[in-house]
Image (cartoon, helix red, strand yellow):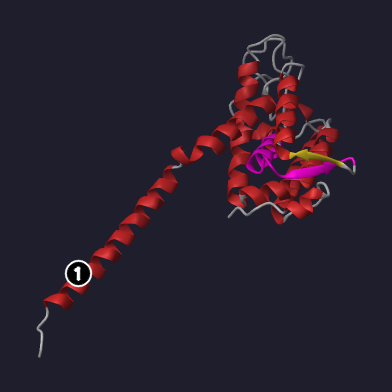
Amino acid sequence: MAYTIDQHRLSSGFVFGFTRTGWLLAGLYGAIWLLAFVANTLGLGGTVDLLLLHSPFNTSDLGPGFAFWQIFTAPLVFAPWNFGAYVIGLLGLGFFASYAEGELGTRSMLRLWAIAALGGVLGAILFSLLPPGQPVVSGFSPSLWALMFLFCLSSPQAQVTFFISVPVRLLWLGYGILAFVFLRAFTGAGGYELGGLAAAWLWWRYGEQLDFGGRLRERKARRVVRQVLDEAYNDIKKDDDGPVYH
């Protein structure tokens, strides 16, 4: 369950730290990167390249090309020759994930993480239709940027201090994240991160209307409440209809 942001803790700036969920994500992606690195070192780089996302429309891609499983593998794999992207991702995870998890709730955070990952794949594929095409992409950057953006929107009036004495509202920080991701989409990074951010925002804003499981649980709960009320009403009616002694 989500809870209110700790304004006192945040006012002094973002504190680096991992929750249990953050450690699990960091360990999972780290283990996958290590396996990809070992495979690449052993001369299996072509196999690893099959797991990264290649555009189905980019004819200038000299790699193995697009395969349907890349939709699911690319968000899980960091390219073994790009360890820096994983380290930067860990920094973002450590500074933001604990706050996002506290504000959004663990289950909602993981759901948004997965939705942003798939949205990033869709965004990358769509952007590959535009010149100069979409580069080969991988990693959890769409999910991380989406969590950072939604965390800022969930507590827009809260403030965080930058550079020791500069207070910044989270709403402004969210707009800055949006502008940065938007510019990256048109300056070489393609739609991978922008697609993830857009998909996560749409689910965060309208997802409850599409949460069929939640609707079914709500209807079941209403039926149970109605049944209890009916039984209570019938018991009271029986008492009223009983014999009266003077």
Magenta part of the chain: 144-163
Check disc 1 and give the amino acid type.
Asn
Q: Residues within 10 Å of mark 1 (few under 14, many from 20)?
A: few
Q: Please, which residue is most extreme toward the right here?
A: 164
Can you tell which quarter of the image residue 139 is in?
A: top right
Q: Is residue 148 magenta?
A: yes
Using the rendered image of the protein, determine whether residue 21 is visible from the camera's viewpoint. yes
Can you tell which quarter of the image residue 240 is in?
A: bottom left
Element type where label 1 sits in the image: helix
At 60% from the left and 35% from the top, the residue drawn is 200
Residue 100 or residue 32, whichever sits in front = 100
Residue 227 or residue 5, whichever sits in front = 5
Q: Please, which residue is most extreme toward the front here?
A: 246
Using the rendered image of the protein, determine whether residue 42 is visible from the camera's viewpoint. no
Q: Which quadrant would the N terminus be assigned to in this image?
A: bottom right
Residue 48 or residue 112, whichever sits in front = 112
Q: In x, y percent, where is residue 208?
A: 48, 41
Q: Which quadrant would the C terminus be assigned to in this image?
A: bottom left
Q: In x, y percent, where is residue 129?
A: 63, 12
Q: Please, which residue is most extreme toward the bottom here?
A: 246
Q: In x, y percent, where is residue 173?
A: 75, 35
Circle 1 residue: 234
At 37% from the left and 57% from the top, the residue drawn is 221
Q: Is residue 171 above or below residue 227?
A: above
Q: Is residue 155 magenta?
A: yes
Q: Is residue 61 above or below residue 196?
A: above
**Left of 216 or right of it: where is 55?**
right
